[in-house]
Every structure is written in C-alpha cells, then in structure tokens.
Image: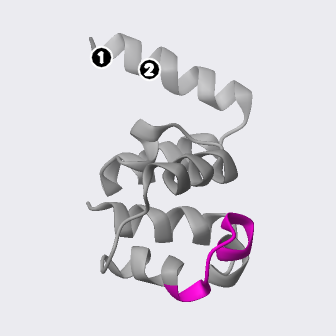
Amino acid sequence: MALKENLRELRESKKLLPREIADKLGISRQSYVNWERGVTVPNSKNLNKLIEIYGVTKEFIMRDSETFEIQHNYLKLSPTRRKNVLNFEGKLH
C-alpha cells in the first residue's frame, strides 16, 4: 500500500479533516489532499511533522495497509489483551 493510503487511514483514524492536518502543517488543504491522492508527496520536513502529529515512526507511516490494520486493531486492545496477543504470537514460533 502506498503512502497516500496510509496518510488517509491515519487521518481518518484520528477523526481529523484534511483542513485540520493542513493547518497543523502550515500548508494549504489542497497540498495535503494532493498527498492523499498521490499527486505529490510530502518533503522530508513535512513527513517528519506528520510523524509527530500522528505519533508514529517513519517505518509505520511508510508501511503497507495490512500491517496498519493489524497494528491499529492491536492498539485498540486493553493492556491485558495486548499481552495475551504477544504471548500467543510467541507460541507460534
């Protein structure tokens, strides 16, 4: 999955509008929308700002969609359930 889809998924998971992210970045709404459409990509400065806004790593923002869905669902779990998932995963290896 491309960066454009990841940006949209992250924004929607935070229940933010493109305008709100653009304002946080100090760019136009259209510039941000162009990233989500894959017309252009953010420069390294704006990519780092996005990482801060979303509280994710560069690897996470550049990841594939399936990984995002798994991690997103994992983060919704309680600490106890997260531990259970990790224990189960450890038993698979």
> Which of the image's four quarters has the N terminus?
bottom left
Magenta residue span: 22-30
- Residue at the location (67% across, 71% down)? 21
Point out which mark residue 92 bears: 1
Which one is in front, 6 or 26? 26
Q: Which picture quadrant has residue 26?
A: bottom right
Residue at mark 1 to residue at mark 2: CA–CA distance: 7 Å
Question: Mark 1: which amino acid?
Answer: Leu
Which one is in front, 8 or 65? 8
Point out which mark residue 39 bears: none
> Which of the image's four quarters has the C terminus?
top left
* Left or right of 29 in this view: 71: left
Q: How many marks?
A: 2
Which one is in front, 8 or 74? 8
Which one is in front, 28 or 20? 28
- Residue at the location (59% across, 68% down)? 11
Q: Position of residue 87 (x, y in %)?
A: 49, 15
Secondary structure category for the residue under label 1: helix
Q: Position of residue 13 (x, y in %)?
A: 61, 65
Q: Position of residue 20 (x, y in %)?
A: 73, 77
Question: Mark 2: which amino acid?
Answer: Phe
Which residue is under mark 2?
Answer: 88
* Left or right of 21 in this view: 65: left
Rate crowding at label 1 as few (under 14), some (14 to 19) or many (20 or more) other CA atoms within 10 Å: few
Secondary structure category for the residue under label 2: helix
- Position of residue 89 relative to residue 47, above or below, is above
Tell whether label 2 touches label 1 (CB within 8 Å).
yes
- Residue at the location (36% across, 46% down)? 67
Q: Is residue 29 inside the magenta stretch?
A: yes
- Position of residue 90 relative to residue 70, above or below, is above
- Residue at the location (29% across, 17% down)? 92
Q: Is residue 26 inside the magenta stretch?
A: yes
